[in-house]
Image (cartoon, coloured by chain):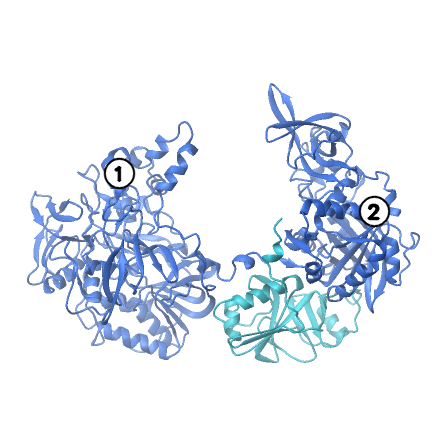
Amino acid sequence: MSTSRLTHGGSDIDRARPLTFTFDGRRVEGFAGDTIASALLASGQAIVGRSFKYHRPRGIWGSGVEEPNALVDVESADGRVPNARATTVPASDGIVVKSVNASPTALADRNAVLDRFARFLPAAFYYKTFMWPDWHLFEPRIRAMAGLGVVDRDWKPRQVADQINHHCDVLVVGAGPAGLAAAAGAAAAGHSVVLVDDRTHPGGSLRHRAGEVDGVEGAAWVEATVAKLKSSGQIVLTKTTAFGLYDHNLVALNQRHRDGRPDTLWRVRPRRIVLATGAIERPVPFANNDLPGILSADAALAYLLRHGVLVGRQIVVATNNDSAYEPASALTAAGASVTVVDCRREGGAQARAGVRVLAGRLVAAARRHDAVQGVLLDDGTRLAADCVLVSGGWTPTVHLFSQAKGKLAWSDQLAAFVPGEAVDGIGVAGAMAGTVSLSETLASGVTALDAFGSSSSPALQSTGAEATLGVVGLWPKPKGKGRVWIDYQSDVTAKDVELAARENFVSVEHLKRYTTLGMATDQGKTSNLNGLALLADVTGRAIPEVGTTTYRPPFTPVPFVSLAGARRGSMHAPIRRLPLEANHRAAGGVFQEYGGWLRPAFYGSGEARAAIKEEARRARQSVALFDGSTLGKIEVIGPRAAEFVDFIYYNTMSTLKPGHCRYGFMLSENGVVFDDGVLVRLDEHRFIVSCSSSHVAAVHARLEEWRQDRFGRDAVYIHNATAQCATLTVSGPNARGLMEALDLGAALDDASLPHMAVAAGRFAGDEVRIARVSFTGDRSYEISIRADRAEALWERLQREGRAFDAVLLGLESLMILRAEKGYIVIGKDTDGNIMPHDLGVAGPRTKRTSEFVGRRSLFTEAANDADRNQLVGLAVRDGEAPLATGAHGVEKSAGRLRSIGFVTSSYQSPTLGRPVALALIERGAARHGETIDVQHLGVVRQATIVAPCAFDPEGSRLHA
Amino acid sequence: MRNLAEKWPAAPDWTTAVLNKDGISVRTLGGLNQLLVSGDLTAWSQASGLAGGGVGAGAVAGGDSYMVRIARDRILAAGERPFPIAAGWHEAGFAVSVMDAGLHVFEIEGPALAGLVARATALNPGQASRSASILFAGVNVLFYRFGNPDRARLHVDRGFAPYLWEWLEHASGL
């Protein structure tokens, strides 16, 4: 291949601005406006990469997003971008470009030897070869060999990627002649327009193919049209790919920048979409059609006219259609010797002077060393060539149309699939809609706006030469000689497709997965149609009968940094913050995430385990202060509120008197315990659901759902007021003393405020709610105060607490205290099977007569199973360490170990001086006193089943 | 045990924190009285003296007290003075909960407000929305303009206020 830069020409490059970069360590020169690919071609670099599987040498094939071969890692001051397409990345000064899947370089790849064993490595060989003794033995090595570019694990974006939502009347995808005609028409009709194109410059084919609009040369018409759009306030985005079309015609755009900024993600919601996405030239099937030096004829024309690059001196063009003659003529005019091998007997009418045409002939094989050296025709003729251009017809770029669930229709005339029945809100235009001539193309741009309205100004006219196609099918044939490449990027040959069909993978979706045809970063843009045409031939079907695989976003790869935007790091999953977080930080709180909240796990700078034990010990001895602000505070208000909570809860709640609260379960429809918590009744029509901290959103949604489904709009209303109040808990033997020191204006004696009662008080002028509920087993008070006034109360509690040796309690020590008492945490001490009677709360199941959520499921065969797991405590022998949470109770059955349940919570109790554990064990409630085996990581220990409550089983401390 | 307080920065002092960034100024609006009201909104209007149906997302509110529409039977009443209406059920047919401290209020002002809205929300600036309840930077908020088109108020669950502040600090393109 003897590519070279011409001394003149190249509409995209600025010869006054030279640049240099390196490719695989070699210096490459180019000009501003070059892509990496055009600069590599201009410098004579034939081999730019190695194929995925066989490490065959590969050269540049295309000039845009369709490029299957020229993937490179690009390193610049902004970091490294892996697997960039050399055809779409601008060349710039100083960048370091490396080929992918090659070691050390694409030119001298030490793994090239793999190609010699190709006959032993057909499609899916590893599915068959590495199954014994275990695929996982081989998987790491195979995965290490796979993959293309190298990810820079230390890379960090310099800034957050911008993400923009935008609304407009018309979004036009593709700024070729059809797209420009549509955009101009829409703008003239007064619509707001966004026009996007994935190239650096708008214009599409008019930038390198002949065309004239209204007497103006094509490129000049493009410039004038774009200028007019911009001046009228329309948005024109170049270097921007519409990569996904989603529900309700939301279109996602990937906008690339040249100044180091991460790509911008646009989410555009237009009223109408015009898809003018063009078409991609297909390869021609012949043996060795993957050699470096074989490229798309249209790409060769683009490199010639846009970049001033001549792709060869002695060129063979293999084709089945008229569109190959324009490149042939242009390359001849540029000084190359060009022979067109046209499979059509009548081909060649478009040939200009100097172009040799061999009509009715086929290229059978490309002759090779590392790059193409010539071709062998079907009649045995040998032609010398340093470059082979291929034009096997055009495949409309229907990806976005198909993503919108548009059906495709086969066109014999075009030998391609084109959009079928129209999709609401979407118009199609240009080559993707099957137009060939510029007249048709311009007209289709206006038609695509039908029913939406376009300008009434005179239609655009093509006034120059009109393109023709005259394509005939030139598809891969079974049982051909040599290796005919179907998919360059996935290294799929015609023989692989035949093999798949022989093994009965005759669905196109199965073919894809068996051979990887159409996978990888190019998603088969050049290969799909040839692949399914061959499958059709092998299976005796017509191409439309075979159909296509499913098109899914993204059309081209999109960087994760762009998709993430600001939602990364600490902002990836927003976490709720406590009203008193600053106080907890100041007190030395060590924070963890619990159920979507950032909460203190413990306090102090000491070793965690010791600090947690000390907090738990002191809480039992004196008084503990705990921030329980995360507890749910969902208000249920309305004339049927009591009936509603009865239905929602497992327990009867309507009998609760105002000023009191009750513990209860909520069940799922399948009878499983969904949440537990305390229900407070403030007055006849107003309740507060104090659900688990991590379940607030889910409980709120459940309440709202049942309200709407069963109770109607006038019966009850649900207000999530969790954030309104902070809840500060005072717990321990000295709790009442500390509470009295606060002087909240409420009587705290047991007669006035018994356990599970609620009172109103005041602090610093604000009303507070005092509830006597306990999650520690000790006398406890929960004080709820508006969140923005909680700080003063918390400080007062700590100040007054000094006289009582008060201790700040983190969540970890609270977990010890509640486990000592056998109090459960839903989701930790229960799983997706546990029903209330498994927890020892069977009363409502047997006694309630009214309906409640989950009721019917409590009487199924499974619910009545005698072997259900039930909540128990586990005790270990004196001096032994705590059991591991998650350890399984086991027993031998038929010579094998069988799980009989598992440990859900396990702690060393500083108060009891021994471990405590909760577990779910088969028939556990009836097995108290029984010793079972407990296994963890292969070690078996013994534990005795006991009651869940290990501390103060009489409950006297609640009133102490 | 890793202290995750290092991962999430402490919230600023809301009473003084101001974010000035490329044509946008953000501060906390303290002291706004807020009531969540559901039910018969006509009855509520008669009881409260607040007329209208409440502003939707992007619409302009004004005055000492006003209503922000959340759903067809739910509004947030906001005002500089306390509303003389008790929390709980009202026989006229509406339920009231106090949210004075539950919803943190940011006031955002500046000529780049439209750019911020385009980055934080999927709102169509050319189409009125009946409800002010939207996703803003991924979290539920009530969003509307106040006084003029370049000033907005945003009510968010107070637990998410530090996140939104961090998002506003880091979001690109503002």
For residue A692, side relative to residue A95 (left or right): right
Measured as percent of width and height from the top left, residue A253 is found at 41, 62
Q: Is residue A419 visible?
A: no
Give me the residue at 89% from left, 61% from top: A746
Q: Name the residue under label 1.
A: A114
Picture layout, residue A210 above or below residue A812: below
Looking at the picture, which amino acid does disc 1 mark?
A: Leu
Residue extending furthest top? A895
For marks 2 and 1, give the one nearer the viewer: 2
Give me the residue at 64% from left, 27% from top: A940
Question: Which quadrant of the view contains residue A321?
Answer: bottom left
Measured as percent of width and height from the top left, residue A934 is found at 66, 29
Picture layout, residue A654 above or below residue A844: below
Measured as percent of width and height from the top left, residue A209 is found at 20, 66
Q: Name the residue under label 2.
A: A621
Q: Mark 1 lies on which chain?
A: A
Chain letter, blue: A
Same chain check for tags 2 and 1? yes
For residue A850, side relative to residue A881 (left or right): right
Q: Which of A864 and A84 is in front in this view?
A: A84
Question: Which quadrant of the view contains residue A916?
Answer: top right
User: Considering the numbered disc 2 on the image, is that residue within a helix, a strand or a loop?
Assistant: helix
Q: Mark 2 lies on which chain?
A: A
Looking at the picture, which amino acid does disc 2 mark?
A: Gln
